[in-house]
Image: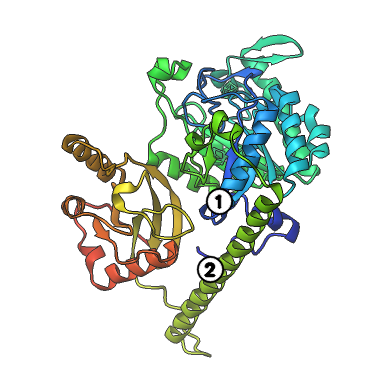
Amino acid sequence: MTTDPLSSLPADVREKVYDHPCYSEDAHHHFARLHVAVAPSCNIQCNYCNRKYDCANESRPGVVSEVLTPEQAVRKTLVVGAAIPQLSVLGIAGPGDALASTARTFATFGMIKRYAPDIKLCLSTNGLMLPESMDELAQYNISHVTITINCIDPDVGAKIYPWVRWKGKRIAGREGAAILIEQQQKGLEMCVAAGILVKVNSVMIPGINDEHLKEVSRMVKAKGAFLHNVMPLISSPEHGTHFGTIGQRGPTAEELQALQDACAGDMKMMRHCRQCRADAVGFLGEDRGAEFTLEKIAATEIDLEAAANRRAEVRAKVAEELESKRLRQERLANEKVSRQALVVPLGSARPAQPEPSAPVVRIAVASSGSDLINQHFGHAREFLIYEASSAGVRFLGPRKTALYCTGTDTCGEAESALARSIEALEGCVAVLCSKIGFEPWGALEAAGIAPNGEHALEPIEDAVRAVYEEMRLSGKLAASQGISLRHSA
Ligand code: CLF
Ligand code: SF4
């Protein structure tokens, strides 16, 4: 469960993955990405998209603050790369489709390749024009491509895509969806053949493609996709999307997790996606866009060499940290094997005894990055949810919450934000944070969630494992009231 997922990869793939915050769950604790919004137009229509909003392929709804020219985007990248030395990836993910504005997209990538060659280039697309863009992908050394594939059946596609623009014509319904699907599959195969790492994003739309996505997962794995990211449909009437106006709902957290688990039997799943804006800046889950407006960027001096050196230092430091995490996990796994060996004496014909049944529980974590328990409960905008059991610890995904403590809240606002935080923690037996106030402590306890500030600044998985053991040994897990506990076999 907690063994290093990168260790089994070939060296060239590991190099592409270890510092990419989306392709490696570990990396997302340590490395940042930047999206530059240079691609305003699109060549298809999705029923979950309203062009006033970011591309839902790679974003949560929210207007892009500024559409940039390639020159502005490059300057922004260099400024951000100097201010945030953890920056490892530049992505183009809209606000329309990166390959519907190829001139702008590749002009941006071309300049970054020249001025900051250490930054990885990442592109997100609906896939319609992917096969036609392979020469440029090779020319600019694009190492990572995300294709949003919501279906492989045109009948399902007709319910998601009202039209696609193909060879100058708008083609509606099933026929349009069939063209899109064919192009996506062809593009996926061509990228894999060219050694580009492909992630497939799928938007889960209950009642339309939820069951079908299992088949999509099998198919894209068979064609060589590296990772599958099933994201929930975000749908609200105020977004003005077709699905929003007809009341099409998104999945619940439980439905999403069940589908991700079902797909995981066939391939590696991404569970830490934050459905970023097309102009997102910083670590996944944070948005530092306001620090880098065009005005501020224009007024900033950049020392390219010093910035590149700082990024290299960060990479080396993180590599050390990840290596020590790997060694820790290896030691823990070995200790577990030794304990099991004690149960069955060497040479005994008796089969190994299964571990006694132990609860499988959820534990939430407040973290601002670096893979540590390092955030005050009241400052958390999201909680990371982990599943803990006698088999180990695994990350389930983030859950967004309202900021409880701003220092300026009126009492009533703070109270309702606290209630929303507690709501976001539903189903968890404990929440780990660096600090927590008296009032939320009491409210959490009353809700049956144990607050815990005793593991501040410890690595997340170690702390979750330790708290699980403490609770298990003290009998608190079995005694938990009002919390649904699943039990391992
Ligand atoms: Fe951006 Fe996408 Fe590249 Fe990442 S995001 S273009 S692969 S650098 Fe990442 Fe954001 Fe999820 Fe996208 S968390 S929405 S998967
Ligand atoms: Fe919107 Fe993206 Fe779909 Fe284009 S591909 S319609 S920008 S969600």
Seen from the viewer's position, the closer of residues 166 and 327 is 327
- Queried on whether the Cβ of the residue with tag 2 lies below 8 angstroms from ligand 1, the answer reads no
Residue occupied by mark 2: 325
At a point 75% along the width and 47% down the height, the residue shown is 117
Seen from the viewer's position, the closer of residues 454 and 358 is 454
Residue 25 at x, y percent in the picture: 54, 53
In the rendered image, is residue 212 in sight? Answer: no
Residue 262 at x, y percent in the picture: 50, 46
Quarter of the image holding residue 207? top left
Give above or below for 476 relative to 169.
below
Asked if residue 137 lies left or right of residue 61, the reply is right
Residue 282 at x, y percent in the picture: 53, 44
**How many labels were placed on the picture?**
2
In the rendered image, is residue 200 in sight? Answer: yes
Query: Which numbered tag is attached to residue 470?
Result: none
Three-letter amino acid code at disc 2?
Answer: Lys
Pick whichever of labels 1 and 2 is earlier in the sequence: 1
